Amino acid sequence: MAKTAELIIDGKSYKLPIVEGTENEVAIDISNLLEEAKVITLDFGYKNTGATKSAITFLDGDKGILRYRGYSIEDLAAKSSFLEVAYLLIFGELPSTEQQKKFTDDIKMHTMVHEDTRKILDGFPSSAHPMGVLASMFCAQTAFYPESLDPNRSSEAVYLSIVRSLAKMPTFAAWAYKNAVGHPVNYPDNTLDYCSRFLKMMYGLPAEQYDVDPVVADALDKLLILHADHEQNCSTSTVRIVGSSKASIYSSISAGINALWGPLHGGANQEVILMLEQIKNDGGDTEKWINKAKDKNSGFRLMGFGHRVYKNFDPRAKIIKKAADDVLNKLGVKDPVLDIALKLEEVALRDPYFIERKLYPNVDFYSGIIYRALGIPVEMFTVMFAMGRLPGWIAQWKELRENKEPIGRPRQIYTGQKLRPYVPIAKR
Ligand code: MLT
């Protein structure tokens, strides 16, 4: 007997189907509620509302669990690679040796971008935020690959769009950085692996030998794995709702990049460093700023602490913390901002005020620290997040299309004026 929930409105009973997931999550299916009961539900920010069924990522905010296609984030961060995780998220299974080689080689074939993309890049002043440049260059790919405007064209065409997206993201990201610093762009060196290729495009200078530090490349690969997907977060939900209108993969991803840009989402790692620099420039008195954070009238909030989904700890933060410690030690980085970060972390992990409010250091806190230690400029932090999140966006867009999900169209409760007659301006 299928489980149901009962809703009683004005004495009338409505039976609503109960849906249960693989990990025993429970939802009330309200798909027919408006038709049957002439009512809708209201849930600002959809924090209690499921938009879809997905087999890609499972997370448990209470237990601090995060799994991609059933594999724990701890296992994948320790044993896998970013491109292998990308394959897993997008195609559902870990690749065989042959599948991984083909995937990696196919990506290498497409790391170059159409030279006319340079004209788009050149139109941006150096003051342009790299996220705006990235989103524009991604959407512009619809112009160079117009066949992508039909997302259902064929599985081969979808595969090609997927490979092109993964291949060109590091090139676009490095070019957005070069535009910000006013340096000439570099072209991809396909003799290198995914992260090393990006680092060389980002930091390489004309006529100079650039040797990628394997410690930095390995740390970056791990960071990208940790950011690869996170079920229906803001930017992924944006990719899905744009994709639900049958928009191309490139415009859907471009929308996701723009959603990620916000300081409440992917921009949080940039805000962490700006906060730490504010504390340093104020003399570095962490105790003073901890007390400001506790004073609700101060208007100051500690960035990088707590999480809207994880109630006890962010599993990614634990992994990144270890990676940050390793990188700082291996690179011998000495940075007063990072010293302040470690002091804040130490206080947040023992102070009852933060413990009671679950304000523990999250993934943005540690990713901001490690990106800074890797020498990545703060304006590029959210671009790094986008590079990591790309396979998740692709996997969710592909799942939506394969499941033939309907166009997203939420409803509302109207609170405006009732009907009123038009009044000519002369009589107002
Ligand atoms: C993410 O990884 O997307 C962030 O933790 C935000 C979220 O999941 O809501």
Image: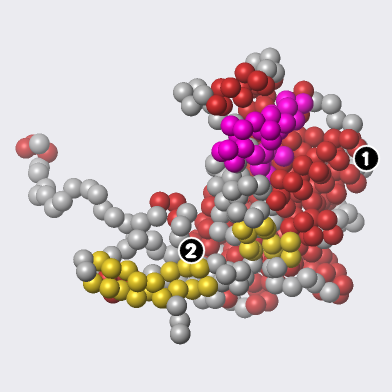
Q: Is residue 134 above or below residue 54?
A: above
Tell me residue 83's x, y (percent): 78, 61
Which of the 4 image quadrants contains residue 56?
A: bottom right
Which structural element holds mark 2? loop
Sequence-first disc among 2 and 1: 2
Q: What stretch of residues is rendered in magenta?
A: 339-366
User: Residue 209: which disc?
Assistant: 1
> In the depicted view, which residue is nearer to us: 362 or 291?
291
Q: CA distance from mark 2 to mark 1?
A: 51 Å
For this rendering, which residue is in front, 152 or 315?
315
Residue drawn at x 56%, y 22% as measured from the top left? 292
Q: Position of residue 239 (x, y in %)?
A: 55, 59
Which numbered dot is residue 90?
none
On the image, numbered disc 2 is attached to which residue? 50
Q: Quadrant of the C terminus?
A: top left
Q: Is residue 47 visible to us here?
A: yes
Q: Nearer the viewer, residue 103 or 89?
A: 89
The residue positioned farthest toward the top in the image shown: 283
At 27% from the left and 73% from the top, the residue drawn is 13
On the picture, is 376 further left or further right than 312? right
**Corner quadrant of residue 331:** top right
Q: Amino acid at mark 1?
A: Gln
Camera-near label (2 vs 1) is 2
How crowded is the residue under tag 1: few (<14 C-alpha within 10 Å), some, or many (20+)?
few
Q: Is residue 398 visible?
A: no
The kind of secondary structure element at disc 1 is loop
Measured along the vertical axis of the image, is residue 91 above or below residue 143? Answer: below
Q: Residue furthest bottom?
A: 1
Check the image and report above or below for 302 versus 116. Answer: above
Residue type at numbered disc 2: Gly
